[in-house]
Amino acid sequence: MSREVRVRFAPSPTGPLHIGGVRTALYNYLFAKKMGGKFLLRIEDTDQGRFVPGAEDYIKESLEWLGIAPEESPWKPGNVGPYRQSERKEMYKQYALDLIEKGHAYYAFDTAEELEAMRERLTAARVVQPQYNGITRTQMKNSLTLPAEEVKARLESGDPYVIRVKIPLKEEVRLNDLIRGWVMVHSSTLDDKVLMKSDGMPTYHLANIVDDHLMGITHVIRGEEWLPSAPLHVLLYKFFGWESTMPQFAHLPLLLKPDGNGKLSKRDGDKLGFPVFPLNWTDPVTGENSPGFREQGYLPDAFLNFLAFLGWNPGDDREIFSLEELVEAFTIDRIGKSGTKFDIAKARWFNEQYLRSKPSEELGNFLTAFAKAEGVDIPAEKATAIVNLVKDRVTFPAELWKESRFILIAPSEFDSEVAAKKWNTDAVNLLGSYAVALDGFTGTFDAVSAKSLLESTAEAEGIKLGKVMQAVRLAVTGMGGGPDLMEVFAILGSQEVAKRIRFALDQLPIVG
């Protein structure tokens, strides 16, 4: 009988959640849902020196904003908690001691100075990668080289120590990665990593193996940066005797800079003007503010769709997927091996598609909120009519106000370049006559009637409408371009159009 699929996202609370981490969380979520399993969140806070206040809540809020909240977490515990590694501290040591008893780990008493001296000796001997391994451990102070009585005495007297894994000298470690296929590493290239630090806290290598085992994790989907550690993790499962329940591994490709040259960083976002974090973040120490996708106006469903395609594709030409459709289409074998360039233009494109496809009533609510912040109240029906007119011109919700402000607030200034070229005697004559015609208009004032009345006025004045249309737009909107002008007139109403025309006639001098 197959086990229930259980995956985990295990970030460290050392700062804001990077977009690469968000993508890892999303892929874990999609896989769990596709397989009818569970998605867990575990906070890996064993490095207390790097803990940043507020980072945990930031992780929680980010996942909730995106709609991919886990079924089990520190805030929603299941029956395999605690879900913070710092709260599981006491259990790790027993597993480290178990490895010592089985001959797969040992105590190491080396001081920082002794470790540095070892590295200097190896560097002088032209060793490319100096490390504490199967050869160098025989020359260091540890329970493999010291007499048992001395080891016992050091432990009893409270001498500081770490616990290191004992990597076998001649063994081929094999790993069948779900994305990369078979990965084979010879144990001679591995070092004896520290499993338990001198402060009693486990390192990532010990804690994540123990936790994944105890939490029943069946698949570990994580970033490519952990691939070099995977052979050690395979060995630890073997040393513990947990090979039969060892999870399957999938190491995700890197998110690359827009030019493809290296891993995407916050510095790249700052330099090129785009966020690399899901939400705004203020550093609690420096006070530095970093922008987030949410606050810049990205919709969560558009952002998720964009993220999903950073390394995965459905195998066909489709690009727009709801979260439910992503779950249905997602398979790990469609994730690529190579890194993916970050393309902010594509993120904006996704946002445009999602924004424009939203119901006009919902977009109207966006506009109403932005207008209210500017002291302008809009009836719901009018807001809906406005967004129908401008929504194909916007990428972010805030632009609804920017693009429609001229409708809601009469212009007090006019584009000087357009005025210099188009505000002539013909334009003034036509607009004066059109204002009078609007005063006497009694029918239903819509785009069709507004245009018909303007055309008949131009004909009566003997003026070619095409030559003065930009001046007509300027008089009513203050600008030389924009959405369909007759639709704007319909929203404004005949009296408001006439009022704006007369104001423009008073303000603008004739230039020709």
Image (cartoon, rainbow, N blue to C red):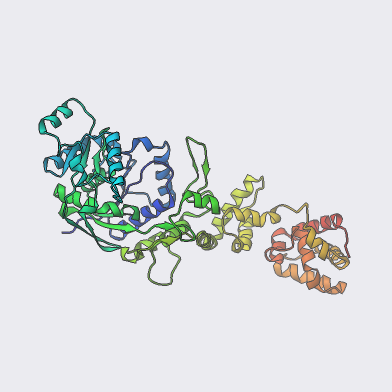
Residue extending farthest to the front is: 125
Quadrant containing the N terminus is bottom left
Q: 128 or 57, which is in the foreground? A: 128
User: Horizontal and vertical percent for residue 123?
Assistant: 31, 46
Picture residue at 39% right of the left edge, 66% below the top: 313
Compared to 417, does 76 lie above or below?
above
Compared to 133, does 407 lie above or below?
below
Q: 194 or 74, which is in the foreground? A: 194
Residue 296 visible in the shown view: no
Residue 126 visible in the shown view: yes
Label count reads: 0
**In terms of image quadrants, where is residue 164?**
top left
**In terms of image quadrants, where is residue 503?**
bottom right
Q: 319 or 403, which is in the foreground? A: 319
Compared to 468, does 369 lie above or below?
above
Residue 460 left/right relative to 243: right
User: Horizontal and vertical percent for residue 105?
Assistant: 17, 42
Residue 102 left/right relative to 458: left
User: Horizontal and vertical percent for residue 320?
Assistant: 45, 65
Quadrant containing the C terminus is bottom right
User: Horizontal and vertical percent for residue 395?
Assistant: 57, 59
Residue extending farthest to the top is: 157
Picture residue at 69% right of the left edge, 65% below the top: 487
Picture residue at 68% right of the left edge, 66% below the top: 484
Q: 434 or 95, which is in the foreground? A: 95
